[in-house]
Image (cartoon, coloured by chain):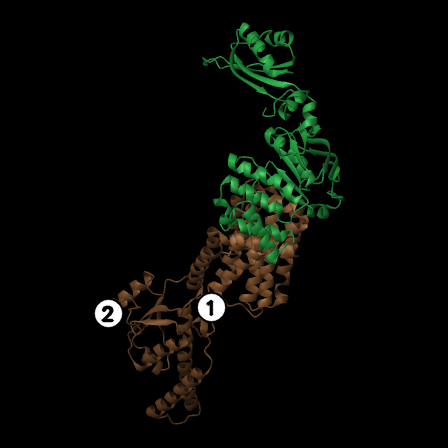
Chain colours: A green, B brown
Amino acid sequence: METIVDAQNLRKTYRRSDGPDIEAVKGVDLSIRRGEIFSLLGPNGAGKTTTISMISGLVSPTEGDAVIGGHSITKQPMAAKRLMGFVPQEIALYPELSARQNLLFFGRMYGLGGRKLSRRVDDLLAFLELHERRNDRIDTFSGGMKRRVNIAAGLLHKPQLIYMDEPTVGIDPQSRRRILDTVKQLRDEDGMTVLYTTHLMEEAQELSDRVGIMDHGEIIAMGTHAELTQQVGEEDRLEFTVSGGVADGAPARIQREVAGVTRVLYDAPEQAGAESVEPAAARLTVFARHGRTALPPIIQVLDSAGLVIQSVAVREPDLEAVFLALTGRELRD
Amino acid sequence: MRPILTIVLNDLRIFLSQRGNLVGLLVIPVLLTVVIGWSLGQFVGGGQARLRVDLIDLDATGMSARLIDELRATNGALVLCPLDNDADDYCSLDGEALDLNRAIERARAGGTEALIVVPAGYAAALENFQRASIDYYSMSDPLQPDAVLQSLEAVLQRVNGASMTAGVAGALLDNVTTGLDLPAFDESVRKEFLGALYRNAEQKLIEMPAPVSFETGEEEAGGDASDNGFNQSAPGMGSLYVMFTVLGGMAVLLRERRQWTLQRLMALPLSRAQILGSKIVVYFVLGMIQYMIVFAVGGVAGMDFGDDPLALLAVMAAFVLCITALTFALAPWIRSEGQARGFVLLLSLSLAPLGGAWWPLEIVPDFMRTLGHLSPVAWAMDGFQDLIWYSGGFGDVLPEIGVLLAAAAVLFVVGVRGFRYG
């Protein structure tokens, strides 16, 4: 399949006069195929936005380059930018203008005009179910509606490639659903390539053809959902919240005595305040080949260790598990 | 070029859609220009000047009446009380008679500019070809010119000149008669001869241009351009509000960065020069609109635009460009919209008065005039004065335009180098 984005050794270092330099992105190599949805998944601060900003020409890389449809973003930025649409994480619209006025303005900036632009704006507003509010000022819109206009502004010129930086942040589930469906439609019906960043594992899992997992400025894993989950094997993940003191020996006993358990991670409880009467809760994550079979003996071990189980969840292999397996931390940490 | 025009029109649309901006651009500058223009007009001479002067005629003869008439003819601004009092009681006599004591008290209290007393025997002195004297009372500063006194002296010079001519002729006649041992003239003949000589001399003196004359009149009648307060207030208030409007660009750039519209523009196929250039054009256009509004108000109020409107536009454009450059030079250092607002107030309210936007720099001490030229406002005001007050042309304001453009060039370099896009 043809490659539309080819980023090599992208690196961004922010120089600081009042402290050590910050290496936000540490040499990212990235290849995105035409017509796919590629997600960059990682916790906040992983370097996703900086990476996408370098690829979209918003930030100059300290090192490396990205080639978009055959045009270098550092050497031929105008040609590269013509191929892209950009949907930033923030609502990058003029709040004093209506939805239609905003879209007409950005459309003109892409060189569109006249009836063609007017029709395109109306089509997009209808596509995003905003036609009835087209003449209302943006600052009167809900968060979800603003997000949809924000997306429309990046789609005006029917770009071959669209960047979406956490487009569902801070909105209600209904609006989020609508945006996710829109993203899939862009790929399935318009053949657009989507570069999508998110810190939500469910979004990446649902949308993406391929996922790059980022942490601390590096891509630590990349591939399809199946390829990535294979990295952690076919293990289920059993998550326990327990209280009753420090589980001395319990993790080791589970790994030793319960069949199918491959690994146990134990997050010690945070120190409770002196005035607190509630025992502090700890988190225990158990990786097992057959989670549902392993669950009863694990509960027995915890009971015998004097720990009180507050909650239990059994999860099948997913990107969260991949991230956990690779970093020892959960995505939300 | 088209993207720049699109951004400029969009930004102007957003600016003008804000009611607060319209108040700052239109309402307040217009009100202030009118109020200050009207006030300065009153101060520097709008309307006809009138000088209230008490006059006590103790002689009450035809001669003294002629003196009074000549005084009125010499200085039309004099209102001789109580003779010239009007229905509005300009003399503030409150219906009471004006005697010498009251007139002296009025002069001493500053109720009148001066008191002129024509003493009894004034006409007799003149008829005997003696020097006639007039009593003059005033509290005015003896070191300053006194228009009333100068008018009086001009009239007395003529009156005494004619009297002196006749007196000298009489003495000459007597000396010749005695020296040549001729029979003395008959007294009535002699008096008639000298009287005719006096009238002839007086007529000649009246026909001669007065040594001092005072003309007053309304602006329309050809008064000095400086008499219209709007000639000062329109350029001054215009320059002040150009600074308020254009320097406000510091906060708007910050806001665009905060609301990410600046970043979205950067993701478009536009060069950074196009983005920055369009923002510069926006604030340049707003500055020119601001000047146009204020000068239009001045035009309605009858201000003088001088003889060279293109030169006037050039001074405006140079000043707006300089302030726009200052805005973009300062923008990279601004960290919050509150800080930007503070800067706008600080700069506008210090550079404007320092540069003579509120009052002419002619009235301040020399060192303040020199210091004032650190402000671009002073250079703009110099240019406006050259064109409006002294009817100068393009050549007269080239130095001012040159200084403003040079400052703009330096500030633009600073601004472009320091401008942060991200």
SS class of the residue under badge 2? loop
Q: Is residue A184 left or right of residue B342?
A: right
Establish if A50 lies above or below A71. above
User: Residue drawn at (60%, 52%), measured in percent from left and top?
Assistant: A120
Quadrant in the picture for the C terminus of chain B: top right
Label of residue A159 in the image: none
Position in image of residue B125 (x %, y %): 34, 79
Q: Is residue B348 left or right of residue B164?
A: right
For this rendering, which residue is in front, A26 or A130?
A130
Q: Is residue B104 left or right of residue A255?
A: left
Label of residue B302 in the image: 1
The quadrant holding residue B147 is bottom left
User: Residue drawn at (38%, 76%), measured in percent from left and top?
Assistant: B71
Q: Chain of mark 1?
A: B
In the rendered image, the residue lying farthest to the left is B96
Establish if B195 lies above or below A303. below
Whether residue A303 is visible here, answered yes or no, is: yes
Position in image of residue A111 (x %, y %): 65, 54
User: Residue drawn at (62%, 37%), measured in percent from left and top?
Assistant: A165
Q: Nearer the viewer, mark 2 or mark 1?
A: 1
Q: Chain of mark 2?
A: B
**Crowd class of label 2 (few under 14; some 14 to 19; many from 20; radius 10 Å):** few
SS class of the residue under badge 1? loop
For this rendering, which residue is in front, B14 or B142?
B14
Whole-number angstrom distance, CA of label 2 to CA of label 1:
42 Å
For this rendering, which residue is in front, B216 or A101?
A101
Whether residue B420 is visible here, answered yes or no, is: no
In the rendered image, the residue lying farthest to the bottom is B183
Q: Which residue is mark 2?
A: B97
Is the Cβ of the residue at disc 2 closer than 8 Å to that at disc 1? no
